[in-house]
Amino acid sequence: MKTILLFLFIGIYVQPILAQDNLPIIDMQLHAHPIDGQGPPPVAICTPINPMPVWDPIEKYSDVFLRMLKEPPCDNPVWSPTTDEELMQETFDVLDKWNIYGVLSGTVDRVAKWRSLRPDRLYPAIEMSISPNTPSTDSLRSLHKNGKLMVLGELTTQYAGIYPNDDKLEPYFELAEELDIPVGIHIGPGPPGVIYLGASKYRAKMHSPLTLEEVLVRHPKLRLYIMHGGYPMLDDLLAVLYAHPQVHLDVGVIVFTQPREAFYKWLKAIVDAGFGNRVMFGSDQMVWPGVIERSISVIKEAPFLTDAQKRDILYNNAARFLRLSEEEIERHHKN
């Protein structure tokens, strides 16, 4: 159960809006996960996590958390499908409806299966930490050579208590810099209380983007984006964005897990500081395809963003970061 619960997330409810313009969207954080990856299906997420969980240690936190997923205390939760095929198809349906192109991570085999059915909408990535099952740099080099690896990430080493500047990660950053592969690394929130769900080495102080500095200095040509934006360590994030102009971030999970007031306060501070051109959309969709639409709505309905800024976050910044060709961008806009 601890392993199953490790990557659980809950999100915010927002009223979905219609896909009115069909302009393309790039989702920098899609996952090809098994349907039971968040617990025995079906499981639900309440939107938002408000109030955040409160725990009396008289009982196991895992029981408290799983109960929230099975008996969601909200009026309009997002329920997961019940089979792997349903999860995949419902995700595809959302991608088609909203004209979304996604960076898809997971195991090599699962990503390959999804992409075999929708190569037009999915860019291959790999989800990995540091463990006995971690792919070797040689295997990643081979995947890249064969067109099966475009992005190295999501790197989930924070859950294992491994800092970005750990020597164990150095060969992978070297490879990414050599091959010019973008890297997406988890720096920020996991499930609330994740330490007590099996990730005993996870620490809140690892939310800080400042943990990336030595890596960035050591690898100045590395294209790196901070998944989950180092939330809520805003000052640390702004300092890193200022000092390292190559760094980008995505809004994965926090866009649908945080109450709008809290998320908007965070995002507005980034935009007001002049870094709106480095914010990229990400849903962090795992087993709940419905959260993708709700995440898009949060960006489209942000009252402080101009239409141009919304398009930058939803598409333009990621297209530039991924170095998509003019032909690829034109194709996206014709669909």
Image (cartoon, rainbow, N blue to C red):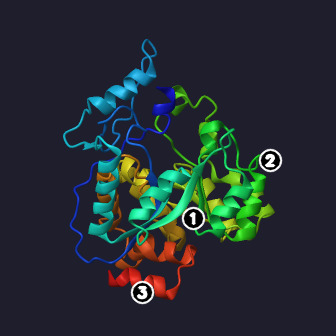
**Nearer-the-camera pick, 266 or 185:** 185
Q: Nearer the viewer, mark 1 or mark 3?
A: 1
Mark 3–mark 2 Cα distance, whole angstroms, equals 41 Å
> Element at badge 3?
helix
Verify CB contact (< 8 Å) between mark 3 and mark 2.
Answer: no
Q: As drawn, which residue projects farthest toward the top?
A: 58
Query: Image quarter for residue 265?
Result: bottom left
Q: Which residue is mark 2?
A: 167
Q: Residue at x 74, y 57 (%)?
A: 138
The residue tagged 3 is 330
Indicate the position of residue 182 as horizontal and vertical percent values. Answer: 62, 66
In the image, is 161 to the left or to the right of 283?
Answer: right
Residue 121, given in percent of the width and then of the height, sits at 41, 69
28 or 31, which lies in front?
31
Q: Secondary structure at mark 1?
A: loop
* Kind of residue sitting beneath label 2: Asp
Viewport quadrant of the C terminus: bottom left
Name the residue at 62% across, 36% down.
203
Does residue 22 appear in the picture of this structure?
yes
Badge 1 is on which residue? 148
**Crowding at mark 2 (Cα within 10 Å: few <14, some 14-19, many 20+):** few
Q: Give how far across and how far down residue 333 sits, in percent.
A: 36, 83
Label 1 amino acid?
Answer: Lys
Q: With 6 as the anchor, is 201 left or right in this view?
A: right
Q: Dot 1, crowdedness within 10 Å: few (<14), some or many (≥20)?
A: some
Sequence-earlier tag: 3 or 2: 2
Q: Secondary structure at mark 2?
A: loop
Q: Which amino acid does the dot numbered 3 rest on?
A: Glu
Q: Is residue 221 left or right of residue 290?
A: right
Instruction: Say whether disc 2 or disc 1 marks the residue closer to the N-terminus.
Output: 1
Residue at 33 percent of width and 65 percent of height = 95
